[in-house]
Amino acid sequence: MGRRAYATSQAACFDRARRLGVLAGAPDHRNPGARDRAIDALTQQYGATGYVSAEPWARFYLLYDPYAPRSGWAQEGPYYAAGKGHLVSRSGGTLFSALMAPRTEVDHELEYLSDFQLYRNGEWAITHPMGYAGPAVEGEGVNGLLVAGLSAMSAKGPSRAESGNGWWALTGSTQGSRYAAGYYQPPPTYLHQWQRTVVHLQRNGLDHIITVDRLDMQNPQSLANFDRLPDGDRNRIQPARGLVGGSFIPSGPAALQVTADSGAPPAASR
């Protein structure tokens, strides 16, 4: 890793510490003591002062209470943030994360619908490059699905989160036009419905990730006004030839103990 990339990734610790400090002191926060323990862990790992440390900015002290009681931050069980469509579950040494990203209309928002990651045995078994622009916010750069080359339409987001004995699931959907209302002579709408469910299942010491996709779509290249697509989207759609494809990014030896299955039929049959 280059010097600049290392400095950028490590220097981000101060921002995480600042945010955790503000959240820990918020009067309506669900578990402020847990955030204090997370701050302790960051400072122990990266140091409390100096370059590329977890030394916070001054805003950290606006709400932070250094005398607040501590509580465990690495708690067992699931947590679902409905507003962001983010499901996180911790069980033993395994941390599972699934996302069904809603449309937010904020700068650098995620353009894809679905993603998942898995941490086990002290390392990331399934992950992908991180960033705030380019491939990192598009479907090509995450563990998701490309529908005729695109990873989501304008309307997208979570539907529900579920869990049971040793399993956790998140469902979301996207459909309709790729572009917001008012687009002049809009390109064709070819994705009428795509619903995805991501399930994490633990059995016999193994982690199983199952994805189930239900699609109602047409080949966009066979529809009227295809030439109205912006160059960027058209360049993604044309090589896909109206098919569906997925990406799966294992990382490290732990991935050898992970199984991933999809409930969708082969792309050629759609």
Image (cartoon, grey):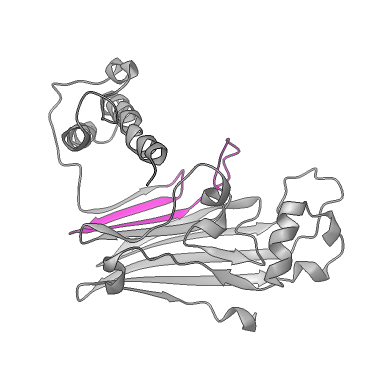
View extreme (front): residue: 2
Which picture quadrant has residue 225? Answer: bottom right
In the rendered structure, which segment of residues is drawn in magenta?
82-110
Instruction: Specify whether residue 109 is painted magenta.
Output: yes
The x, y position of residue 32, in whole percent, is 23, 31
The residue at the point 45 percent across, 57 percent down is 160
The residue at the point 46 percent across, 45 percent down is 84
Horizontal side, residue 93 vs residue 57: left or right: left
The residue at the point 35 percent across, 40 percent down is 6
Query: Could you say which is closer to the camera, residue 83 or residue 263?
Result: 263
Which picture quadrant has residue 55? Answer: top left
The image shows residue 30, relative to residue 240, as above or below, that is: above
The x, y position of residue 38, in whole percent, is 22, 37
Instruction: Specify whether residue 37 is painted magenta.
Output: no
View extreme (bottom): residue: 269
The x, y position of residue 100, in whole percent, is 49, 54
